Amino acid sequence: MNNVTLGGPGWTYYETLGGGQGGGPAGPGPSGVHVGMSNTRNTPVEVLELEFPLRVRTYALRAGSGGGGAAGGGDGVIREIEALAPAEASLLSERRRHGPRGAAGGGDGAPGRNLLNGAPLAAKAAVALRPGDVLRIETPGGGAWGKPTGEGRR
Protein backbone atom coordinates (compact mmCIF):
# COMPACT_ATOMS: atom_id res chain seq x y z
CA MET A 1 0.00 0.00 0.00
CA ASN A 2 1.26 3.48 -0.87
CA ASN A 3 -0.67 6.40 0.63
CA VAL A 4 0.16 10.09 0.53
CA THR A 5 -1.70 12.90 2.24
CA LEU A 6 -0.86 16.53 1.53
CA GLY A 7 -2.49 19.54 3.08
CA GLY A 8 -2.28 23.14 4.10
CA PRO A 9 -4.58 25.87 5.38
CA GLY A 10 -8.01 25.21 3.82
CA TRP A 11 -7.14 22.13 1.76
CA THR A 12 -6.30 18.42 2.02
CA TYR A 13 -5.40 15.91 -0.69
CA TYR A 14 -5.20 12.13 -0.23
CA GLU A 15 -4.21 9.51 -2.77
CA THR A 16 -3.37 5.84 -2.94
CA LEU A 17 -0.68 5.11 -5.52
CA GLY A 18 -0.58 1.93 -7.56
CA GLY A 19 2.42 -0.35 -8.01
CA GLY A 20 3.42 -3.47 -9.91
CA GLN A 21 1.44 -6.67 -9.53
CA GLY A 22 3.23 -9.99 -9.38
CA GLY A 23 3.46 -12.32 -12.36
CA GLY A 24 1.84 -15.74 -12.22
CA PRO A 25 1.33 -18.96 -14.15
CA ALA A 26 -1.16 -17.20 -16.43
CA GLY A 27 1.29 -14.45 -17.43
CA PRO A 28 3.11 -11.28 -16.43
CA GLY A 29 1.77 -8.89 -13.83
CA PRO A 30 0.30 -5.55 -14.89
CA SER A 31 2.09 -2.28 -14.17
CA GLY A 32 0.80 0.71 -12.19
CA VAL A 33 -2.25 -0.93 -10.63
CA HIS A 34 -3.92 -0.93 -7.23
CA VAL A 35 -3.45 -4.55 -6.22
CA GLY A 36 -6.07 -5.96 -3.88
CA MET A 37 -7.97 -2.67 -3.61
CA SER A 38 -11.34 -1.66 -4.85
CA ASN A 39 -13.13 1.62 -5.42
CA THR A 40 -9.96 3.69 -5.88
CA ARG A 41 -9.09 5.86 -8.85
CA ASN A 42 -6.14 7.57 -10.37
CA THR A 43 -6.28 11.34 -9.89
CA PRO A 44 -5.60 13.10 -13.21
CA VAL A 45 -2.66 15.50 -13.09
CA GLU A 46 -4.81 18.35 -14.44
CA VAL A 47 -7.32 18.00 -11.60
CA LEU A 48 -4.66 17.88 -8.91
CA GLU A 49 -2.89 20.98 -10.27
CA LEU A 50 -6.13 22.93 -10.77
CA GLU A 51 -7.53 22.26 -7.29
CA PHE A 52 -4.42 22.32 -5.07
CA PRO A 53 -1.20 24.36 -4.75
CA LEU A 54 0.80 21.45 -6.17
CA ARG A 55 2.62 20.72 -9.42
CA VAL A 56 3.14 17.18 -10.70
CA ARG A 57 6.68 17.04 -12.03
CA THR A 58 6.72 13.33 -12.88
CA TYR A 59 4.04 10.68 -13.19
CA ALA A 60 5.32 7.61 -14.96
CA LEU A 61 5.81 3.88 -14.78
CA ARG A 62 8.98 2.94 -12.91
CA ALA A 63 10.68 1.06 -15.75
CA GLY A 64 12.55 -2.06 -14.73
CA SER A 65 11.15 -2.25 -11.20
CA GLY A 66 9.27 -5.52 -11.79
CA GLY A 67 11.09 -8.76 -11.04
CA GLY A 68 12.49 -10.87 -13.88
CA GLY A 69 11.25 -14.34 -14.67
CA ALA A 70 9.17 -16.45 -17.01
CA ALA A 71 6.25 -14.13 -16.16
CA GLY A 72 7.71 -10.80 -15.08
CA GLY A 73 6.34 -8.63 -12.32
CA GLY A 74 4.66 -5.37 -13.28
CA ASP A 75 6.43 -2.05 -12.87
CA GLY A 76 5.69 0.37 -10.05
CA VAL A 77 4.91 4.08 -10.42
CA ILE A 78 6.86 7.29 -9.92
CA ARG A 79 4.87 10.23 -8.59
CA GLU A 80 6.87 13.42 -8.06
CA ILE A 81 5.01 16.41 -6.61
CA GLU A 82 6.30 19.95 -6.05
CA ALA A 83 4.77 22.08 -3.30
CA LEU A 84 3.74 25.55 -4.51
CA ALA A 85 2.72 26.68 -1.01
CA PRO A 86 3.60 25.59 2.53
CA ALA A 87 2.11 22.15 3.23
CA GLU A 88 2.34 19.07 5.41
CA ALA A 89 2.92 15.65 3.86
CA SER A 90 2.24 12.28 5.42
CA LEU A 91 3.38 9.00 3.87
CA LEU A 92 2.18 5.54 4.75
CA SER A 93 3.91 3.07 2.46
CA GLU A 94 5.11 -0.52 2.42
CA ARG A 95 7.85 -2.59 0.80
CA ARG A 96 10.60 0.02 1.26
CA ARG A 97 13.17 -2.30 2.83
CA HIS A 98 12.47 -5.52 0.89
CA GLY A 99 10.80 -5.73 -2.50
CA PRO A 100 7.88 -8.05 -3.22
CA ARG A 101 9.12 -11.63 -3.45
CA GLY A 102 9.11 -13.60 -6.66
CA ALA A 103 7.57 -17.08 -6.75
CA ALA A 104 8.60 -20.40 -8.31
CA GLY A 105 12.12 -19.11 -9.02
CA GLY A 106 11.08 -15.65 -10.25
CA GLY A 107 13.00 -12.53 -9.25
CA ASP A 108 11.92 -10.09 -6.59
CA GLY A 109 10.40 -6.73 -7.48
CA ALA A 110 12.36 -3.59 -6.61
CA PRO A 111 11.56 -2.03 -3.23
CA GLY A 112 9.90 1.37 -3.22
CA ARG A 113 11.52 4.66 -2.20
CA ASN A 114 10.32 7.94 -0.74
CA LEU A 115 12.45 11.06 -1.22
CA LEU A 116 12.20 14.72 -0.24
CA ASN A 117 14.43 16.94 -2.38
CA GLY A 118 16.50 13.83 -3.16
CA ALA A 119 17.00 12.80 0.48
CA PRO A 120 15.51 9.45 1.60
CA LEU A 121 12.42 9.40 3.80
CA ALA A 122 11.15 6.53 5.93
CA ALA A 123 8.26 4.33 4.79
CA LYS A 124 6.08 6.05 7.36
CA ALA A 125 6.89 9.76 7.56
CA ALA A 126 5.38 13.16 8.23
CA VAL A 127 7.23 16.21 6.89
CA ALA A 128 6.69 19.93 6.39
CA LEU A 129 7.00 21.15 2.82
CA ARG A 130 8.09 24.62 1.75
CA PRO A 131 7.33 26.08 -1.68
CA GLY A 132 9.70 24.46 -4.15
CA ASP A 133 10.16 21.23 -2.16
CA VAL A 134 9.77 18.07 -4.25
CA LEU A 135 8.28 14.88 -2.81
CA ARG A 136 9.09 11.79 -4.90
CA ILE A 137 7.36 8.47 -4.32
CA GLU A 138 8.57 5.37 -6.18
CA THR A 139 6.25 2.43 -5.62
CA PRO A 140 7.53 -1.17 -5.64
CA GLY A 141 7.52 -3.43 -8.67
CA GLY A 142 5.84 -6.82 -8.54
CA GLY A 143 7.67 -10.09 -8.05
CA ALA A 144 8.04 -12.41 -11.06
CA TRP A 145 6.82 -15.96 -11.40
CA GLY A 146 9.02 -18.78 -12.71
CA LYS A 147 12.67 -18.92 -13.65
CA PRO A 148 13.76 -16.79 -16.62
CA THR A 149 13.39 -18.71 -19.87
CA GLY A 150 16.21 -16.97 -21.75
CA GLU A 151 13.77 -15.70 -24.37
CA GLY A 152 14.31 -12.06 -23.49
CA ARG A 153 11.23 -11.79 -21.26
CA ARG A 154 11.61 -9.97 -17.98
Image: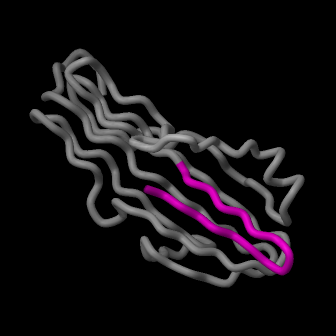
Give coordinates of residue 43: x percent, y percent. 70, 45
Bounds of the magenta segment: 1-17
Task: Give the residue furthest to the front.
Answer: 39
Give coordinates of residue 138: x percent, y percent. 50, 55
**Apparent side of residue 123 relative to residue 154 in the rendered image (left or right):** right
Position of the C terminus, as image quadrant, is top left
Q: Nearer the viewer, residue 135 or 5?
A: 5
**Apparent side of residue 130 relative to residue 2 in the rendered image (left or right):** right
Instruction: Residue at 53% x, 76% y: name it.
Output: 119
Task: Give the residue furthest to the bottom.
Answer: 128
In the picture shown, does residue 117 fall above or below 22? below
The secondary structure that most of the magenta stretch takes on is strand
**Apparent side of residue 4 relative to residue 22 in the rendered image (left or right):** right
Report if residue 60 lies within the magenta region. Answer: no
Q: Nearer the viewer, residue 127 or 119?
A: 127
In the picture shown, does residue 143 fall above or below 130? above
Task: Give the residue furthest to the left.
Answer: 104
Report if residue 8 lies within the magenta region. Answer: yes
User: Toward which corner of the image does residue 151 lie, by quadrant?
Assistant: top left
Instruction: Residue at 76% x, 46% y: name it.
Output: 45
Give coordinates of residue 18: x percent, y percent. 51, 45
Give coordinates of residue 90: x percent, y percent. 58, 74
Q: Which of 154 and 92 is in front in this view?
A: 92
In the picture shown, does residue 31 fall above or below 94? above
